[in-house]
Amino acid sequence: MTVEEQEEEEEERAAGATDTRRNHWRSAKAATGNQGCLGNLALSIKRGRLRAHIRVPMEMVMRRVSEEEEGRR
């Protein structure tokens, strides 16, 4: 378990999260390989946290979109 996962678990326990909700969040991240897909992004926004492991891939997506737009010009 990484330091980030330990911090998340501590925050969730402090917030009174149930084991079911914690396990659902963990399995959703594991199923996507933690790549910051829209499913993880939606869960993070819903829970009020947007973490670095999600921001970095989204920046890559936005960079690629802007490169494609420049290519069309």
Image (cartoon, helix red, strand yellow):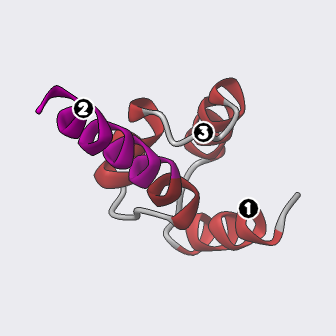
Q: Which mark is residue 35?
A: 3
Residue found at the very far left of the displayed protein: 73
Res. 39 image quadrant: top left
| Residue positioned 81% across, 72% down in the render | 3
The residue to which callout 2 is attached is 71
Amino acid type, residue under disc 3 in the picture: Gln
Is 48 included in the stretch rendered in magenta? no
Instruction: Work out whether mark 2 precedes mark 1 in sequence or the reverse, and give the earlier one.
Output: 1
> What predominant SS class does the magenta segment belong to?
helix
The residue lying furthest to the right in this view is 1
Near-viewer residue (49 or 63): 63
Against 36, residue 56 (above or below) is below
Please identify the quadrant where the C terminus is shown: top left
The mark tally for this picture is 3
Q: On the rendered image, what quadrant is the N terminus found in?
A: bottom right
Q: Kindly identify the residue that appears in the image at 50 percent across and 53 percent down.
A: 54
In the image, residue 70 lies in the stretch drawn in magenta:
yes
Image-based side of 1 in relation to 11, left or right: right
Q: Amino acid at mark 1?
A: Glu
Identify whether 1 is placed above or below 36: below
Q: CA distance from mark 3 to mark 1?
A: 15 Å
Residue behind mark 1: 5
Cα distance, mark 2 to mark 1? 39 Å
| Residue beneath the point at 58% across and 72% down | 11
51 w.r.t. 19: above or below:
below
Q: Secondary structure at mark 3?
A: loop
Q: Secondary structure at mark 1?
A: helix
The magenta stretch is 57-73
Q: Position of residue 31 (x, y in %)?
A: 68, 24
Q: Which of marks 1 and 3 precedes in the sequence? A: 1
